[in-house]
């Protein structure tokens, strides 16, 4: 797989910044959870954007993603007025597993420390 071009990275960065602001407005009445855009991957054709989100403070992030799916058209329209691009990319939202993995590793390390400390 070819590495991301400088243009792809720049557009991904622009979209990340704009979507971060837009999602605060979009989700403020929907959830009290903290939703963060962790990264935006843009393929070479620049026609789609894969938006990776982390969700903290929600037992089940599914309703948040369902809301975003229903509102994708309006989010794209707002995005088009904020970021001027040749193509207004289709948006695909997904949960970024990094935060969950980090939390799981922390719990495992804590368990290991506690188990190892009790043995002394």
Image (cartoon, rainbow, N blue to C red):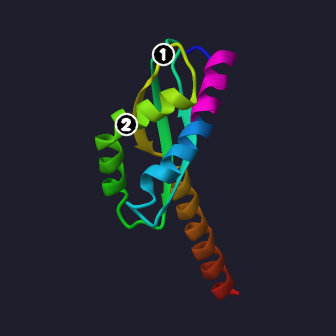
From mark 1 to mark 2, how far is it between C-alphas? 16 Å
> Which residue is pictured at 64% across the width and 87% down the height?
118
The location of residue 26, given as percent across then percent down, is: 44, 50
Foreground of the two, 104 or 25:
25
Q: Element type at marker 1?
A: loop
The residue sitting at 50% across, 32% down in the picture is 79
| Along the viewing direction, whichever of 105 and 74 lies nearer the viewer | 74
User: Which label lies toward us, 1 or 2?
Assistant: 2
Helix, strand or loop at label 2? It is: helix
Mark 2 lies on residue: 74
Task: Determine whether, in the image, residue 13 is placed left or right of residue 76.
Answer: right
Front residue of this view, candidates 89 and 53? 89
Q: Is residue 48 left or right of residue 67?
A: right
Q: Does the magenta stretch include residue 42?
A: no
* Quadrant of res 105: bottom right
Magenta: main secondary structure equals helix
How many residues crowd mark 1 within 10 Å: few (<14), some (14–19), many (20+)? few
Say if 100 sits above or below 11 in the image: below
Could you tell me which residue is drawn at 42 percent across and 31 percent down?
76
- Residue 80 visible to an observer of this rendering: yes
Disc ID at residue 54: none
| Quarter of the picture holding the N terminus | top right
Coordinates of residue 21 in the picture (x, y in percent): 57, 46
Looking at the rendering, the stretch of residues picked out in magenta corresponds to: 4-15
Q: Which of marks 1 and 2 is nearer the N terminus?
A: 2
Disc 2 crowd, CA 10 A, few/some/many (<14, 14-19, 20+): few
**Residue 100 picture location, percent across and down:** 50, 57
Q: Dividing the picture into quarters, in which one does residue 20 lie?
A: top right
Residue found at the very far front of the displayed protein: 81
Task: Point out which mark residue 87 bears.
Answer: 1
Q: Residue at x 32, y 49 (%)?
A: 67
């Amino acid at each position: 797989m070819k590495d991301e071009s400088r243009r792809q990275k720049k557009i991904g960065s622009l979209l990340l910044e704009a979507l971060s602001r837009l999602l605060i407005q979009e989700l403020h009445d929907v959830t009290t959870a903290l939703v963060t855009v962790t990264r935006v991957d843009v393929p070479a054709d620049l026609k789609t954007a894969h938006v990776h989100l982390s969700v903290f403070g929600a037992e089940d992030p599914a309703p948040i993603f369902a809301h975003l799916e229903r509102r994708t058209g309006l989010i794209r329209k707002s995005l088009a007025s904020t970021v001027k691009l040749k193509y207004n990319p289709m948006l695909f939202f997904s949960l970024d597993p990094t935060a969950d993995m980090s939390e799981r590793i922390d719990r495992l390390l804590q368990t290991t420390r506690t188990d190892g400390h009790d043995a002394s």
